[in-house]
Image: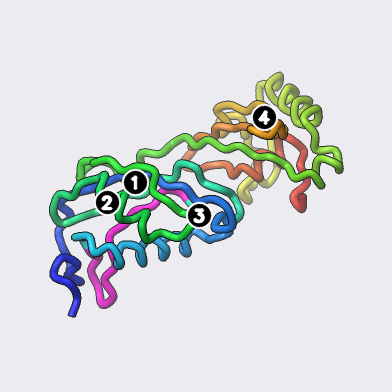
Amino acid sequence: AAPPSVSAAPQAKAYRLRGVSAKTGLLRFLSHLEVARVFQRALARVNMPMAFSQGYHPLPLISFGPALPVGMEGLRELADFFFMPVVDAERFVERMNQTLPDGVRLIEAYPVDVKAPSLSASLTRFEFQVFPSITLAHRGLTAEHFSRHIEEFDRQATRLVEQFKHRAEPVDIKPFIASISTCVDALGASGVSMTLQSHDNCLMKPEEVLQFVCAVPQDA
């Protein structure tokens, strides 16, 4: 029989915690669905009083932010966890980190009103940093390469792209990019820092920015 605090029957969402998590190392290769399953299994082990979905196979109610591309590390990824009663945020983080696998951890959690807008409705800007491998740097994707293309992009009033998101007409990608610049990591490697924003109910992917702004080949 299921523990009394984790009933599989549909429950009202009485309390909501927004968790900030990180996905690093080899686990950056987990898909969005696989990350969701990691959290579902961890929640089953910590035996917290979660609210559950309806249907024949109820699952803990978790709402994740937009999916990261497979292979990209996430340093501050958001997810909402719904509970039946009020739970202590610090204790929730502590217990989850005791059972989550190496490479996935909760950084913090804080209460959010149950009736507040969903993550998908409230998240409009996303920050990314991309660093090319040594192999790509040897192929010419150096700091000078990125600086030259970013400076050219900044000088332009518009940047029209053909067949963007399979649209029939050319699309100006400028409104999708709030900012873009070169950056350096802790080891001195050069890369690109970008802040992408929702425009016309659509988001650019980091790899699309690299392709259309920085002239990085799709197969790089």
Residue of label 1: 19
Residue at x 59% of width, y 44% of height: 205
Q: Tell me the crowding category of disc 1: few under 14, some 14 to 19, or many 20 or more residues within 10 angstroms, Cα based.
A: many
**Badge 1 vs badge 3, beta-carbon distance below 8 Å:** no
- Residue 207 at x, y = what percent? 65, 45
Quadrant placement of the N terminus: bottom left
Q: Tell me the crowding category of disc 3: few under 14, some 14 to 19, or many 20 or more residues within 10 angstroms, Cα based.
A: few
In the displayed image of the protein, which residue is found farthest to the top?
155
Residue 71: give its label. Answer: none
- Magenta segment boundaries in residue numbering: 52-66
Q: Secondary structure at mark 3?
A: loop
Of tags 4 and 3, the one toward the viewer is 3
- Residue 216 at x, y = what percent? 76, 42
Q: Looking at numbered disc 1 in the image, what kind of residue is underneath it?
A: Gly
- Residue 151 at x, y = what percent? 73, 22
Dividing the picture into quadrants, the one containing residue 108 is top left
> Can residue 181 be spotted in the picture?
yes
Task: Estimate the spatial distance between the alpha carbons at disc 4 and disc 2, rounded to whole Å.
Answer: 35 Å
Residue of label 4: 184
Of the numbered discs 4 and 2, the one sitting upstream in the chain is 2
Q: Is residue 75 magenta?
A: no
